[in-house]
Every structure is written in C-alpha cells, then in structure tokens.
Image: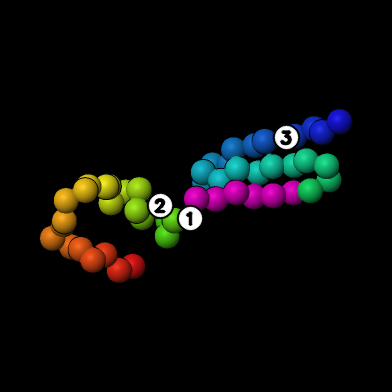
Amino acid sequence: MLELAVTENEDGTLHLVASGEDLTVASDQEGRILFERGFRWEPRADDPYNR
C-alpha cells in the first residue's frame, strides 16, 4: 500500500512524502521560458531564439 501526503508551501513549492521519502518540487524558470514565450508557425522578429 502506498500512502502519499502532499503539502503546498507558501512559496509555491510542493512537499511530497511517500514511503519514507521526502521530496520538494519547485517550478524551474528555465523550463517554463518556452511556454511563456508562446508558439507560432510563422517566423518571429526574435528568431532564432537562444537562451
């Protein structure tokens, strides 16, 4: 049997506890940059985009 406890912290991170393991999950700004930039099929003024 697996028991999972999830707590959302004030700073937006998640604290997960399962099977004696502790894990803190936080959003990575580098990983979100393409989502925030948006997607278009046509060329953009800032292409190619290098991060």
Q: Residue at x 75, y 34 (%)?
A: 4
Q: Earlier in the sequence, mark 3 or mark 1?
A: 3
What residue is shown at x 55% (from left), y 50% (from top)?
A: 26
Q: Earlier in the sequence, mark 3 or mark 2?
A: 3
Identified at 32% across, 48% down, the residue is 36
Alpha-carbon distance for marks 3 and 1? 22 Å
* Dot label at residue 2: none
Q: Of discs 3 and 2, which sits in the foreground?
A: 2
Q: Mark 1 highlights which residue?
A: 28
User: Is the Cβ of the residue at disc 2 closer than 8 Å to that at disc 1?
Assistant: yes
Q: CA distance from mark 2 to mark 1?
A: 7 Å
Q: Secondary structure at mark 1?
A: loop
Secondary-structure class at tag 2: helix
Going 33% across and 67% down the picture, which residue do you hit?
A: 51
Q: Nearer the viewer, residue 24 or 30?
A: 30
Q: Position of residue 45 (x, y in %)?
A: 13, 60
Q: To which quarter of the image does residue 46 belong?
A: bottom left
